[in-house]
Structures are given as structure tokens and as C-alpha cells.
Image (cartoon, rainbow, N blue to C red):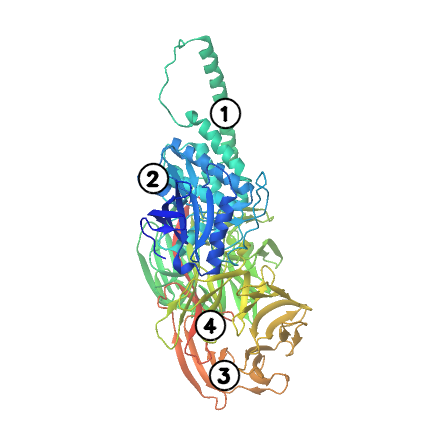
Amino acid sequence: MTLCAHSRFGPYEILDEIGKGGMGTVFRAHDTRLGRTVAVKVLHGELSTDPQRLAHFEQEARTASALNHPNIVVIYEIGQVDAQPYMVMEYVEGRTLRDVLGSGPLSIRKTLRYAVQLASGLAKAHEAGIVHRDLKPENLMLTDEGLLKILDFGVAKLVQAEPLGDSATVETALADTGVGVIVGTVGYMSPEQASGQTVDFRADHFSVGTILYEMITAKRAFQRGTAVETLSAIIRDEPKPIATLRLDLPTPLRWVIERCLAKEPRERYGCTADLARELDGLERHQQELVAGEPKSDPTPFWSPRRIALMAATVLVLIVSATLGIWKYLATRERPWPEFTQLTFRRGAMSRARFAPDGETVVYSAAWEGKPLELFTTRIGSPESRSLGVLNADIMAISSTGELAIGVGCTWNWGECHDATLARVSLGGGAPRLILEHVDSADWSPDGKELVVVNLAEGQYRLQYPIGKTLYQAPGWITHMRMSPKGDRIAFLNHPVLSEVSGSVEVVDLQGKRKILSDHWKSVFGLAWSPSGQEVWFSASNSGQGPGAALYAVDLDGHMRVVDKRLNDAKLFDIAPNHRVLVSRIDPRGLIVGAFAGSAQQRNLSWFDYSTSADLSNDGKTLLFYEWGLGAAGTPTAYMRGTDGSDPIRLGECRPLALSPDGKWVVAMKAGNSGKLILLPTGAGRQKELPQGDIEEFYSAAWFPDGVHILLNAAEKDHQQRSYMQDITGGLPQPITAEASVVALLSPDGRAYAKYNIGGYSICPMHSDTECRPIPGVQDDDTLLRWSGDGRYIFVRGVGDLVLDIYRVNLLTGNREPWKRLTPADPAGLIAIGGDPGQVLLTPDGNSYVYTYWSALSDLFVAKGLE
């Protein structure tokens, strides 16, 4: 329906259009029955047949009409004309706050006047259990008389039904807009909204903070180049300090804004009435906050009353200053350290060390996707010089200036592993080979002996001197360093191979080991303090993804924070003059794919740590997850079309597989790898699957019937094996022996390809003994997909930095190259794929998706870290 001036819409004569919103157009109209001017909001024609949009439209009307407050727009009526829904509301003459802000920042007085009204209106709504969820300057109308009106409760959520007074009671509103749907306006929503979590009234407090920030500065608190970047900034970043943008900003008002903008809801106000009262108090005492015009005072200047008042004021100032100084001394932060950037190219860095002079730095990096290489630079110089040693990593520099390097590295996840240890002069020359299969090395303080972490017979061994084992690890050892006194060796101990969780430990020269700090979800980078009394390290407890900070622990296990402001830091070295060598890492997980045989790859990433999980057989739907959006690094599941349409948030869990009909996802429950759930992709409730004696799940896949799932899991004190489970009921039933796991299911579900110590084989579904080897498949291959016709298996060859896919004929064993894939931008590339689900193909092999990991690094030297 098209409306124009003086057309009629029921009893309302349309005068002109005054605005458009996400769901409808607002018109100024004349109420022919009551003879008053009103605003009529009409749902967009293309949306009026959408039941969910209609429900939201009606929810807006019911929600707002139940509220009676001078700072909330009044709703008069809702109805329909020719199946076109409309809502009649109070007509507010004035300008939106957005229009007002076009002229620049507001004065402190105006900001407080409007802030008090905004908080007062919100307090009324929150008392009724109503959360607005879409506060922004466009939804705040300012009249010429200085009155503020809150508009558009269209995405308000009724938290609970409570009486509003008299006989009016808010009805229970519709359920939320859908599991994981992000509701609100980018740039003004709270971090919990931006990550699709459940919200309460404190989400509106954050929006109030963004609005106050903009009123004071005329700049948005969170604004980036794209909506996705803005959402990420809301979740991760702090806005530019407001005091640096508005020098006359009163400190108490700054405190209010900063408290509203706290990332954690619990750090905001406990109730909106408290926020309103605090703002009201600031407005009433604004004479003390803002310098005003001097008032005439007929009282003599040196009157007894004035003298007494001045004496009292001086006393208060002395006491306040004393308390302030005491508080400052007790709680002051260390000054921000001085950083000097040493590298400026795009790529990933492995290790870096100070030379004995404390001014020269040697580092290893893979710039612009090229092989790892040794470089040297000096503090204060922007230039780096290659040492001419390729595929090599710096491990240590002796007190005499000799380098211990690793050559022939296996480049894995941004670090050099399984290298051949060699010695070479800092001036260059040919390396002299010492020992194979070394992961890290360090010099003794006198520069005569080497301590190494050596991989021998499948075990990581810490040896000093070479050949004498001080400690043999059940998992793996990284970032090993000898103390300045030469009496202890510090290292990071990871209990599970290739995982970054672990502990900081030391061992003495007699092999006595001590744990200094443990239970870190990711720990990497280690160095001794110059005194040898502390071990510094970089670590994080937020799980995978960014967030590492610098810590120090003494030999008694007393730990302290060195600096948490160095987000995503990796520690390399500490010089005798206390300079610290550290890199700033920008880790990313990215998903790319190509479809229907197209060679053009499409980026399907969402936030900064996207990880693929499953791809539908038709290649049109991608199941993936993001690390770090939930609490403590809990993965969050999403589903999106491979055409690039926006994702739908499914919930906090790690998704494993999408059902053949696309209606269910089997996933690991958030925070517990020992619990499996079935998560609906549409309407419905999640279901927890019985686990029996299984303690940990690793991967899952659906049988073609959509009723059974294949699980790779382990019971307590048992090795991993494969199970089948009926989702309609019953416990998982084992289908393979221990230490034997299913890699692929056949298209008809009657056979499977499995892996055990003997290699790959194909077995009928109900017999784990009638198996035959798979010709053409090598032991170090990764099985990716069974072709739809059952004749081929697609496999991945060895290599972390290139993705070689082969097609193997199951009858002849013929192995033919199928695709070689690399990211369009290889800078910073540290790995392609890894876990199951990170390289995905359709049954015909023509559509694919893969996850790759990059970590762009910049090297800095820091002065002032203590």
C-alpha cells in the first residue's frame, strides 16, 4: 500500500512522511475523530505477511502502550486496514538526537538534562521488566521545550510480567527473536547483544553509555569500517578515552559513562533507578561541575560567614587531597612502558633473541608467505638484514655471540619443530650441524654447553648437557631456557601433544622438577628475569584465540601480573638491562571455500576466530563456530549459507556435524567435552544425549538415515574408539576395538573406513574384523570424503602450509591429484586445517570449504616493564 499526502488510512488522514525504520514507515496524520495530530507507523508492505515481523510489530505496541511516563512515547491504538497493520502514537514535534548531534557535541548542561530523562524513562520500563535493546540517537526525540522522548520499543523484550500500577499489567511478550539472532543496532548494542547472548536491563545501560559518549564528543564510541568489525570492536576493544576528546568533562560524569560502557554486565549499574539517581545528582550539582556565570553577592567579602565557609572548604580540600594522595599511592598503576617497533613487514614470526650487546636482535620470520628466514636488526633502526640462512629458526645466542639455530624446520602453528640443531656465527657463514630432532635449545651462561629439548623414540627429553636426560615429558616441551646462574632450566610443559595448554616448570641439574604455575589454557613464550629470581611467560586462560598477557612467577610459585595491557603478546627474551623482546600477534581463523566448480574462493569467516565444522551435501549450508565469544573461550555455533548470507547463531557449544536434512546439529555441550547435545537449527529445544561410560568425545558424523550418529570417543581409562548411537534413545554402542577409529562412513552407511596402527582399511558396518586395506591411501594421509557414488575416497596429503587433495580409486588404488589449495593471502599463514571438519568437500568433490590459521606478528622492544 502506498500512502501519500492527504490519503486516508482508516480514520487517520495522512499529512506527510516523517521517517522510516527497520520495520515500518512513520507518517504525520490527522485523527479525524478526535481532531488531533498523531504519528501513524505502518508496517512495510513486503513485511506485512511475515508472521514474525507482525508479531514484533504488535509486541512494540503492547510493550510501549503499557508504559505511562513523560519520557516514553504514548501509544494510542493498533489496528489493521486491508491486512496492513498500523500503530498510532503520540506525535512529538522536535528533532531526533541524531539531528541535534549533527551540529556538534552538546554542552555538559544539556547532556545531563537529557541523560536524566533518558535514564528516568528507562527505569520505568525496566521496573516493568521491559528491555528496549535498540537505544540510539535516532530513537530519542528532543522537543523545543527540552523534553526527551524514547521512541520505538520494536525490539523490546519482556523479561518478566509485573503490574505497572492501577489495573494495567504487561502481557507476556513473544519469545526472543530466535536463538542467537543478534538484535539491535550495530554501534550501540552491548557486547552481550553483539555476541548473541541473552540480555537483561544492563544491555540498555551500555547503550546509554554509547549515547552519552556521543553527546559529549559528537563521535561514536565504536565505529569501524564494516558492521562485522564494529561488532568485534564492541566485544573486544575499549573506546578512545573520553577525557582525551573532551577536556572540560567533569570526572564524575566520566565515571558514569565508563561504568555504563563496562564490557561485563555485572560491572554496570545494579538497577536503572541508581543510574537515574546518580545522573540526577550530577545535574542538581552541575554548578560545582561546570563553571557558570558569577552571581552578584551583596555580602562583604570578608564577612565572618564567608571566612568560616572558606576555612571549612580549605579543611575539606586538605583532607580530600590527603586521602587522594594515599589512594593514588596505594592503587597507582605503573606507567605505560615505552615500546619501539622493530619489524614492519607482513608475516609470522617464530622466535627472537637479544645479542650480548643488548642492542642487536636476531629473529626468525616468514614474511609475505615466504619460507622461514633468519634476520638481524638493531634497536632504533627500521631496517632488517637477512643472515642468508633459509628455513631456519633462532633458538639462542651465547654470551660470546654464537648462534644456536634450528635448520630444516617443520613449520607448524607458527613455530619451528623437529629441526636439526646447528651452530653459526652472528656474522654469518655455514652452519655446523650438531643434533637432529630438536625443538628448542639454549646456551649455558658461559657459552660452552647447550641444553636441548630432543625428540627421541617418540618422547620429548630435556637434556643437559646433550646426552644426559634431566626430564622426559609425557606430552611435549616448549620454550626451554637456562637460568642466568646456570643452576636451573625453565620450560613450558604441555601434557597433550600439539596442544598449547600446560604449565610453567623448572628442573634443576639433578633432575628435580617443580611446577611454578599450571592450569593455563594456552601458554607460550618464556624468559628468565635478569636476576634469575623470576620466570616470565605469556599465557591466557581464555582458551583458543587472542588474549595472552605477561606474567611473572618466582621460584616459590608466587605469581604476579606484569602487564595485561599487552593483549595478544608473546614473550621472546629479556636483556640484562631489563629490556623485553615481545611480539604483538594478530591471530585469525578464516574460512574460505569455492562452490559448483568455481575456482574463485569466497571468504565465509564471521568474526576473528572462525572454524568450519560441517558442509551440507549440496554445498549450500556451512556449519561453523567462533572461539572466544562466550565466557572463558566457550565456542559459539553458527550456521550460514555459502552464498555469503548472514549467519544464524545456534548457541554456545562446539558443533560437530549437521544432520542430512539440515534440521539438527550434534554438538559438544559448552564447557564439557564429555556431554553431547542435539541442537535444533530452527524451532525446537535442544536435547542432551545419554553418554553411558564415555568421558570424552572427539568427533561425530551422521549416518545417511539421519537417525544414527557415529561418535569417536573414549571411556574413562580406555583408549579412543568409535560408537554408534540412536538419537531416539539408547546408549552409544561400540563398533570398533580400542585404538581403532572410524574416519569415514560410506554413502549408504553399510561400511566405514577406519584407522589404526596398521593404517587405513575398509570394514563392513557390523564387523570390525572383516576389513581390507585401502590401496592408494598412505599412512600419513587424512581421509576427507567418500564420493557419492562410492567409488572414490578424497584424501589430504602431508603439509600444513599447502592443501593437496587427491582422489583415490577404491578398486584400482589409482591416486590422482584433485586440487592444490592455498589462501589468496599467504602472509602470516601458520596452518591449513587440523581437526576434523576443517577441510570439507561435497560428495562430488567440486565444492569445498577449509579453515586456515594466520598470525601476523610485529616485533617490539619494551622498556619500563617491571
Residue type, numbered disc 3: Val
> Residue 518 in the image: x percent, y percent?
59, 55
Q: Which of marks 4 and 3 precedes in the sequence?
A: 3
Q: Secondary structure at mark 3?
A: loop
In the figure, 231 relative to 800: above or below? above
Residue type, numbered disc 1: Ser
In the figure, 97 relative to 192: above or below? above
| Location of mark 4 (residue) | 839
State the residue lying farthest toward the front.
Answer: 33
Residue type, numbered disc 2: Val
CA distance for labels 2 and 4: 51 Å
Q: Residue at x 42, y 25 (%)?
A: 287
Q: Secondary structure at mark 2?
A: helix
Q: Is residue 824 left or right of residue 683?
A: left
For disc 2, the neighbor class at 10 Å (few under 14, some 14 to 19, many from 20) is: some
| Location of mark 1 (residue) | 320
Q: Which of marks 4 and 2 precedes in the sequence?
A: 2
> Residue 328 in the image: x percent, y percent?
49, 32
CA distance for labels 2 and 1: 39 Å
Choose mark 2 or mark 4, whichever is in front. 2
For disc 1, the neighbor class at 10 Å (few under 14, some 14 to 19, many from 20) is: few
CA distance for labels 3 and 4: 17 Å
Q: Which of marks 3 and 1 precedes in the sequence?
A: 1
Q: How many marks?
A: 4
| Location of mark 2 (residue) | 100
Q: Which of marks 3 and 2 precedes in the sequence?
A: 2
Q: Residue at x 54, y 72 (%)?
A: 659
| Location of mark 3 (residue) | 777
> Residue 121 in the image: x percent, y percent?
48, 38
Q: Between residues 110 and 635, which one lies in front from this camera angle? A: 110
